[in-house]
């Protein structure tokens, strides 16, 4: 697909727009990365507010932390108050990632077990 004249024209015009906006985009990127002269002035203002740490120190610190983590088994912090079977927490709430359909399905299973006899289907039994 995408071979119609209209789509070819749109692709061509997007390429033209990229060419036109490339210098502005590069200047904005340099300023954001503080490689430009104007960006350095901003960095001095930032140093007054926050502490600026060189990248070398951060890399060394990460290497040390990775070494410590390898000693542990890397156990995830899970919500220990959540029931593994019903996935309900102590407040009766389902996890954030669960959609309404899944929650309704689990609730149906839970309520069916509580009823004792359960609901029998009406109709002809063969």
Image (cartoon, grey):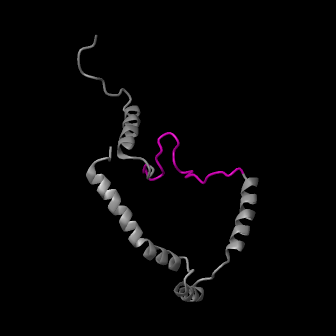
Q: Dividing the image into 4 quarters, which one contains the N terminus?
A: top left
Total count of labels: 0
Relative vertical location of residue 120 with respect to residue 24 in this rendering, above or below: above
Q: Residue furthest left?
A: 123
The residue lying at 30 percent from left, 24 percent from top is: 120
Q: Main secondary structure of the magenta part?
A: loop
Residue 53 is inside the magenta segment: no
Which percent across, then down, holds residue 75?
Answer: 65, 51
Please provide the residue range marked out in magenta.
73-94
Is 40 in front, or is 8? 8
Residue 92 is inside the magenta segment: yes
Relative vertical location of residue 119 with respect to residue 2 in this rendering, above or below: above
* Left or right, 89 with reference to 104: right
Is 28 in front, or is 120? 28
* Left or right, 55 with reference to 28: right
Q: Residue furthest top?
A: 126
Which percent across, then down, holds residue 43?
Answer: 57, 85
Which percent across, then down, holds residue 19?
Answer: 41, 68
Q: Dividing the image into 4 quarters, which one contains the C terminus?
A: top left
Relative vertical location of residue 13 with respect to residue 32 in this rendering, above or below: above
The residue lying at 60 percent from left, 54 percent from top is: 77
* Left or right, 124 with reference to 47: left
Is 75 in front, or is 23? 23
Which percent across, then down, holds residue 67?
Answer: 76, 59
Is 54 in front, or is 22? 22
The residue lying at 28 percent from left, 48 percent from top is: 4
């Amino acid at each position: 697909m995408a071979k119609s004249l209209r789509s070819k024209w749109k692709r061509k015009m997007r390429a033209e727009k990229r060419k036109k906006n490339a210098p502005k985009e590069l200047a904005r990127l340099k300023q954001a990365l503080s490689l430009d002269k104007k960006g350095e002035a901003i960095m001095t203002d930032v140093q007054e507010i926050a502490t600026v740490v060189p990248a070398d120190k951060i890399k060394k610190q990460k290497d040390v932390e990775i070494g410590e983590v390898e000693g542990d088994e890397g156990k995830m912090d899970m919500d220990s108050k959540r029931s593994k079977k019903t996935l309900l927490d102590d407040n009766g709430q389902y996890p954030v990632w669960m959609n309404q359909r899944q929650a309704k399905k689990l609730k149906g299973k839970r309520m069916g077990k509580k009823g004792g006899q359960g609901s029998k289907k009406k109709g002809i039994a063969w």
